[in-house]
């Protein structure tokens, strides 16, 4: 064979080998299959939050990123600003970028279904943080506070405080957006706690807030005008306390625990405002979501799914009821105390 032909042949073989090697590398680096990535390759997780409107969502977002950083996992971030269509596009973008897993806070239980389905179709494991979706025909792992039981425990403590006074109390409950399963659980927890205690607590007002400060404040103002003897109030989220406190102050009803005219107050979340109200002696109790537990559980669930391990469909955060009596003991796990600090 002439020298020129020999060189051409050798170059052709070398080129084929190199191309075959490149093809093999591309196929193993793809994470769209949802399986465990090759050892030594850094994982990438997309974190998509519906909003950072409240302290809880900010604390959760930061806790998840800190947990991922601790495990040397790369983070892609997306905030939908309460727009479900935008969130769908963000999830599709994660899919296009071939993330290894997704942690999402959906806008509500229904509009997120197409986003979850997009992840399912790409075989990318997805975990819903704190707010779950309707099951429909999609697969996800939910990490969520036990809203019903935690609200029930908080309100049961409030009922106990009311009973100690020897007087019947008129109650107001501020509800969240009932398109959110969290809000439904908290409402149902309130109802379960007061049921059977009608001799102590009479529910005279239910204020819909739809997680909106202005709507909550207007509703509480109207309820206090219609029922000026309200002296028992539970809110489905601590983030609404600024509006509620403003309405109570305007009615001359914001008094410390033990003072004449004190309205027994209870909330849900454990944010910095609630912690300060506890310290100042105005708030009787709040149901604290353990944001640290939920962040760690969400990341671990993704890693377990990637490793092919069995993971329950729903991981429950039991949380705890924070009261004046256990503040010192529970401070370290109360995320609002740390945000405030």
Image (cartoon, rainbow, N blue to C red):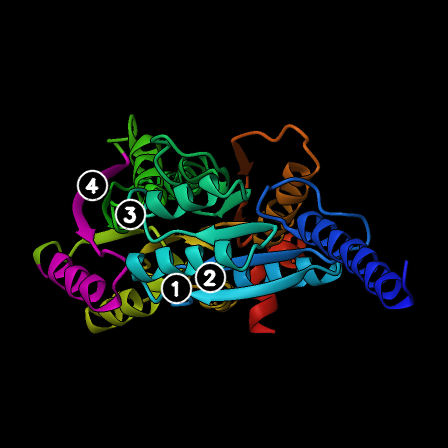
Q: How far apart in space, not on screen, are marks 1 and 4 (Cα)?
A: 32 Å
Q: Is the N terminus in the top left, top right, bottom left or bottom right quadrant?
A: bottom right
Q: Which numbered marker is on residue 57?
A: 2
Camera-nearest residue between 43 and 253: 43
Q: Residue 112 or 30: which is nearer the viewer? A: 30
Check disc 2: other Cα within 10 Å, few if <14, some if 14-19, many if 20+: some
Mark 4 against mark 3, which lies toward the viewer? 3
Residue 23 screen position, x and y as percent: 70, 52
Single out the residue that lies furthest toward the left.
Answer: 226
Q: CA distance from mark 2 to mark 4?
A: 30 Å
Question: Distance between the Cα atoms at labels 3 and 2?
Answer: 19 Å
- The residues colored magenta run 200-225
The reply to whether dot 3 and dot 2 touch (C-beta < 8 Å) is no
Sequence-first disc among 1 and 4: 1
Along the line of sight, which residue is nearer the eye, 25 or 135?
A: 25
Alpha carbon separation for disc pair 2 and 1: 7 Å
Residue topped by disc 4: 203
Q: Nearer the viewer, residue 33 or 6?
A: 6
Report which residue position mark 3 lands on.
Answer: 111
* Mark 3 element type: loop
Secondary structure under badge 4? strand
Q: Is residue 53 left or right of residue 323?
A: left
Q: Of helix, strand and loop, which one carries label 2? A: helix
Residue, disc 1: 51
Residue 133 visible somewhere in the drawing: yes
Question: Which residue is at a point 62% across and 53% down the rendered structure image?
Answer: 292
């Amino acid at each position: 064979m002439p020298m020129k032909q020999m060189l051409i042949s050798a170059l052709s073989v070398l080129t084929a080998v190199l191309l075959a090697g490149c093809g093999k590398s591309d196929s193993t680096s793809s994470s769209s299959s949802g399986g465990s990535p090759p050892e030594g390759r850094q994982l990438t997780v997309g974190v998509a939050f519906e909003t950072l409107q409240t302290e809880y969502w900010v604390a959760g977002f930061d806790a998840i990123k800190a947990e991922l950083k601790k495990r040397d996992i790369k983070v892609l971030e997306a905030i939908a600003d309460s727009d479900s269509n935008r969130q769908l596009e963000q999830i599709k973008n994660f899919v296009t970028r071939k993330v290894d897993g997704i942690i999402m806070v959906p806008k509500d239980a229904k509009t997120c279904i197409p986003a979850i389905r997009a992840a399912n179709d790409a075989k990318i494991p997805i975990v819903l943080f704190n707010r779950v979706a309707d099951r429909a025909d999609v697969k996800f792992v939910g990490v969520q506070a036990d809203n019903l039981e935690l609200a029930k425990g908080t309100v049961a403590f409030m009922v106990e405080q009311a009973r100690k006074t020897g007087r019947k109390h008129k109650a107001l409950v501020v509800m969240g957006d009932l398109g959110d399963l969290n809000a439904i659980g908290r409402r149902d927890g309130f109802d379960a706690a007061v049921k059977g205690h009608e001799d102590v607590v009479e529910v005279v007002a239910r204020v819909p807030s739809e997680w909106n400060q202005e709507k909550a404040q207007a509703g509480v103002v109207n309820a206090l005008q219609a029922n000026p003897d309200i002296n028992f109030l539970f809110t489905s989220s601590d983030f609404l306390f600024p509006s509620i406190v403003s309405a109570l102050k305007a009615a001359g009803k914001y008094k410390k625990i033990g003072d004449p005219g004190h309205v027994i107050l209870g909330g849900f979340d454990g944010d910095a405002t609630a912690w300060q109200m506890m310290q100042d002696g105005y708030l009787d109790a709040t149901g604290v979501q353990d944001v640290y537990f939920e962040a760690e559980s969400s990341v671990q669930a993704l890693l377990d799914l990637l490793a092919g391990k069995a993971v329950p469909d729903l991981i429950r955060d039991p949380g705890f009821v924070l009261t004046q009596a256990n503040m010192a003991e529970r401070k370290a796990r109360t995320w609002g105390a740390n945000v405030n600090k």
